[in-house]
């Protein structure tokens, strides 16, 4: 029997979202599998709306961390447009690449929205996609040359990474993991891949937040849920900011393989839980 989310569940899941959104281990998988492993019976639509709104909270974290970068990129784009040379400045070019890379996830996301929401209700599908994340991380480390800086990116690189982000629409495929791996497969060094991945996440997370706002406003028990949802939003934003800082420092000297192993272990635990339940 399902019951509405509690305040404790909201805070726990908010912390998990903040920690795992930017680590390449799929925050969506953790938001699906944590209630499953702990036996929490949260109504599916309520859980889906909560999951997307805490992803918006981590969008706040990205904006807070990269605000100076965003301001520089936007100013460069406007200046280059006024000069009728949109790709002459590296920062302006990066801005257009972010928009280009956003297109695949936006178009595919609209086409499969209902299937995605259904996937959020399936721990077994989520665990399967978590194995896909593990494979992507392993491939990025083993096959990527990891020598290209973000200023050396081409529009083909941006579009390629954009398709990897599109794959992360489904729970279990890490957005940061798939996009960083996609960048590394195109030769980007790890920190450059992570920076582009985090900047690339902003437009699509903003769009997802707007769409879920419409769902949120349509919920009949919105008044009783907001006091439960808001604390989760706040802790997700704070832990998300700290997670970005830690990961960018970690990737300077360390590989993604430990995260690949973690994804396999969590998927295996979920399959075992299903086997014995």
Image: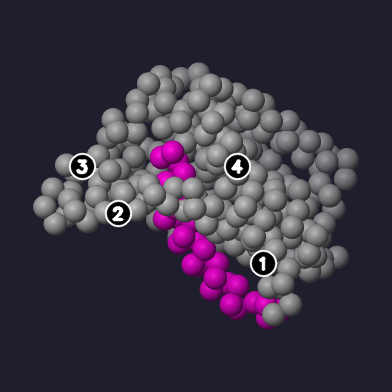
* Secondary structure of the residue carrying numbered label 4: helix
Decide which of 64, 10 is in the foreground and name it: 64
211 in relation to 185, above or below: below
Crowding at label 2, few (<14), some or many (≥20) Cα neighbours within 10 Å? some
Q: Earlier in the sequence, mark 2 or mark 3?
A: 2
The residue pinned by badge 2 equals: 74
Label ID, residue 243: 4
Q: Outermost residue toward the left?
A: 84
Instruction: Tell me if I can see residue 129 in this picture.
Output: no
Q: Position of residue 95 (x, y in %)?
A: 30, 48
Instruction: Look at 69% across and 60% down and name the residue there.
Output: 232
The residue pinned by badge 1 equals: 230
Q: Position of residue 249 (x, y in %)?
A: 54, 31
Q: Earlier in the sequence, mark 4 or mark 2?
A: 2
Crowding at label 3, few (<14), some or many (≥20) Cα neighbours within 10 Å? some
Q: In which image quadrant can residue 121 be found?
A: bottom right
Instruction: Look at 43% across and 33% down and name the residue there.
Output: 193
């Amino acid at each position: 029997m399902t019951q509405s989310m509690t305040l404790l569940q909201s805070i726990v899941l908010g912390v998990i979202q903040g920690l795992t959104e930017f680590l390449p281990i799929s925050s969506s998988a953790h938001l699906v599998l944590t209630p499953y492993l702990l036996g929490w019976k949260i109504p599916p639509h309520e859980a889906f709306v909560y999951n997307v709104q805490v992803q918006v909270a981590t969008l706040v974290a990205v904006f807070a961390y990269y605000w100076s970068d965003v301001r520089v990129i936007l100013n460069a784009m406007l200046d280059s447009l006024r000069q009728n040379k949109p790709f002459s400045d590296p920062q302006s070019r990066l801005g257009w690449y972010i928009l280009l890379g956003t297109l695949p996830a936006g178009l595919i996301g609209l086409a499969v929205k209902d299937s995605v929401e259904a996937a959020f209700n399936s721990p077994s599908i989520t665990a399967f996609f978590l194995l896909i994340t593990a494979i992507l991380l392993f491939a990025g480390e083993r096959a990527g040359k990891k020598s290209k800086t973000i200023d050396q990116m081409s529009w083909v690189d941006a579009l390629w990474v954009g398709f990897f982000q599109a794959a992360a629409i489904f729970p279990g495929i890490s957005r940061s993991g798939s996009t960083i791996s996609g960048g590394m497969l195109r030769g980007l060094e790890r920190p450059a891949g992570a920076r582009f991945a985090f900047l690339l996440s902003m437009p699509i997370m903003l769009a997802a937040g707007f769409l879920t706002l419409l769902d949120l406003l349509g919920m009949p028990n919105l008044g009783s849920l907001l006091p439960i949802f808001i604390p989760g939003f706040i802790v997700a934003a704070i832990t998300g900011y700290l997670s970005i800082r830690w990961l960018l420092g970690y990737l300077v000297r360390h590989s993604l393989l430990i995260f690949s192993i973690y994804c396999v272990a969590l998927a295996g635990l979920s399959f075992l839980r299903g086997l014995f339940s």
